[in-house]
Structures are given as C-alpha cells and as structure tokens.
Image: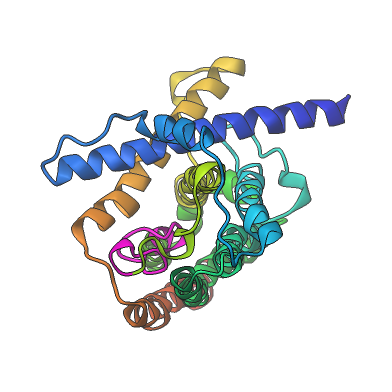
Amino acid sequence: MVILQTVAAAVAFSVIGIVIGLFLLGIDRRISARMQARIGPILIQPFYDIRKLFSKDNIVPENAIPSIFHAAPIVALASSIIVLLYLPIGSMMPILGGYGDLILVMYLLAVPSLAMVAGGFASGSPYATVGSQREMVSMIAYELPLASAVIAIAWLLYSKGISDPFTLQAIVENPVWTLVGPIGFLGLLLLMLTLAWVTPAELSKIPFDSPEAETELAGGLLVEYSGKNLGLFTVAQGVKTLVMGGLAVAIFFPWNISPLLGLGSYAALAVDAAFFFLKVVLLMIISVTAIRTGLARFRITHVVTIFWVYLGLAGLLGLSLVILDSVVMGVL
C-alpha cells in the first residue's frame, strides 16, 4: 500500500512538475520579450509548441546511431523528473528524500546534459558534435563553483551538529541564514550569487548557450532533433528549470507562509506550495530571464574563464567566509 501511494504521488508530482516547468518557459519568454519592448508569446505558448512537436514524426539522420539518438531525450526527461522528486515543495517533504542527498542531486543534475551530449554525438552531425564538445566543456567549468556552494552548505550544517547535513530536508528545516554571523552572512551571499550564475549555465541559457548557439551552430547539439524527440527535450528543459529554481529556494529561501497565516492541514500544504512556486518564478526571472535578456552570448573560452576563475574564486571565498565565521569568530 505504501509503495502504491509513493508511486501515485511520484506520478502526480511528475505531471505537476511538467506543467509548471512549461509555464516557467512561457513566463521566461514573455518577460524577456517585454524587457525588449516586444509583446512576446502568450504564457501557454510552450504547451502549443509541445503539442505541435508531438504531432510530428521523428527524423533520424542517415549517419546517426538510432538507439542512442532516441534514448537521449527519454533519459534527459526521466533524470530531470527524478531530481524533482528529491525536492521539498513548500511544507511537503520530498518523495525520495529518504533515498539520497544533495550530492546525489548534484550528480543527477548532470544527467540531462550528458544525455544531450550523447544525443548530439549520436546524431552524426558536425554541428551537433561541436555543440556536444562545448556542452562538456561548460559542464566541467561550472562544477567547481557548484561544488563549492554544496560543500559550504553541508559543512555549515555539520559544524552545527545537525544530523544528515547533506539532505535537503535537513537544509530546509534549518535555514542557513539563521546559522551564521555577519561574516558567514557575506559568505552565504557570495554562494547564492554564485549559484545564480550557475543556473543559466545548467539550463544552457544566454550568455552560456554556446553549445546550442543558433547563429553559429544552427542549434548545436539539438540541430538534428525534431518531432517527439525535440518535444521531450523541451519538456525536460522545463522540468530542469523548475528543479534549479526549487533547489535555490530549498537552500536559501526555505521559509513557508502558512505559520504566519495560522493555517494547518491541507490548506497549509496548498498555500505553502503556491508560495514555493512563486519564489521559484521570482528567482528564475532574476537569475535566468534578466541575465539572458541583458547579456550577449559568451565565447566558450570566456565561459571557462568565468567559471574557473571568477565564480570559482567567489565560491571558494564564500566557503572560506562560512568556515571563518564558525571557527575563527567563535560563532560555534
């Protein structure tokens, strides 16, 4: 019975995640258009796009490896949904929270990108091959600042004697801002800004979209995809957008609104979930929409420099300030 309830909850969360993920793509396109003084598409345009893509056949290039070419979008979507099941939504604890931690989530986040890389190489297109190579370089580049943020948060919880410091549930139940002094606050601020810059790279958004680069590579690693396969990649992108926003909310903004309103039971769950998605939307507008609208695409060499030098140092400095706050300043 418990297994059936877990499966039913996982299916329901997956459907909700896909719907909200597509809405996030619509919000991103709409607000970006308004920032550029354009009307832009309607919010539900991604749903129309998906319906159109799923009504078309898949076209497989002559030089492609069909098995990998078809499997890549399925793996990308499945892995994105699995990560979603590890996230706490408002006051609802994660469905798979007892079977993994933040380290596992960090590695699962890489799977959709690896699937796109495999699909690009399997397509046999020179444009897709160059795009896949760029995607691999980008992944290697942003792992350092991302790992710095994860290690700092886990170390902070561990230093406070909190059990299971790598689990998202422990992070949500112990807001990190309440565990530090002024120096640690600056460190956390640096880590939050670092994660905000990693997010568009994880999502292959401008200015870190050199693997796709439509004006250079005609779509890069997805250039040969069409029909249902391209639709699956688009859905996976929407779910991963929700995941990245949800991860930032869980780490840096885990507070719920139901205690302030004096709500309980199902009303609290509903209000907290709505508040959670509102926070995700606001964060994605700031860290994805505003950045991609205000900046031009970086060259792949600049991407490596930005993540390995500037954001890498920022992440390490944030980690150092958190440790300094706890150890040297005697906050412990």
In reply to whether residue 200 is colored magenta, the answer given is yes
The quarter in which the C terminus is drawn is: bottom right
The quarter in which the N terminus is drawn is: top right
Residue range highlighted in magenta: 198-216
In this view, the residue farthest toward the right is 1
Left or right position of 326 against 310:
right
In this view, the residue farthest toward the left is 37
Instruction: Judge whether 2 appears above or below 317 on screen.
Output: above
Q: Residue at x 78, y 31 (%)?
A: 6
Left or right position of 35 against 187:
left
Is there any visible trace of residue 227 in the rendered image?
yes
Instruction: Judge whether 31 appears above or below 68 on screen.
Output: above
Q: Residue at x 60, y 16 (%)?
A: 266
In this view, the residue farthest toward the front is 62
Viewer-closest of 291 and 269: 291
Q: Position of residue 125 (x, y in %)?
A: 50, 69
Left or right position of 306 against 170:
left
Q: Position of residue 190 (x, y in %)?
A: 37, 67
Q: Position of residue 25 (x, y in %)?
A: 39, 41
- All told, the count of numbered labels is 0
Viewer-closest of 144 and 82: 82
In reply to whether residue 208 is colored magenta, the answer given is yes
Q: Residue at x 66, y 39 (%)?
A: 94
Instruction: Judge whether 24 appears above or below 187 on screen.
Output: above
Q: Residue at x 58, y 55 (%)?
A: 60
Left or right position of 289 against 124:
left
Q: Position of residue 285 (x, y in %)?
A: 31, 45
Viewer-closest of 6 and 232: 232
Is there any visible trace of residue 166 in the rendered image?
no
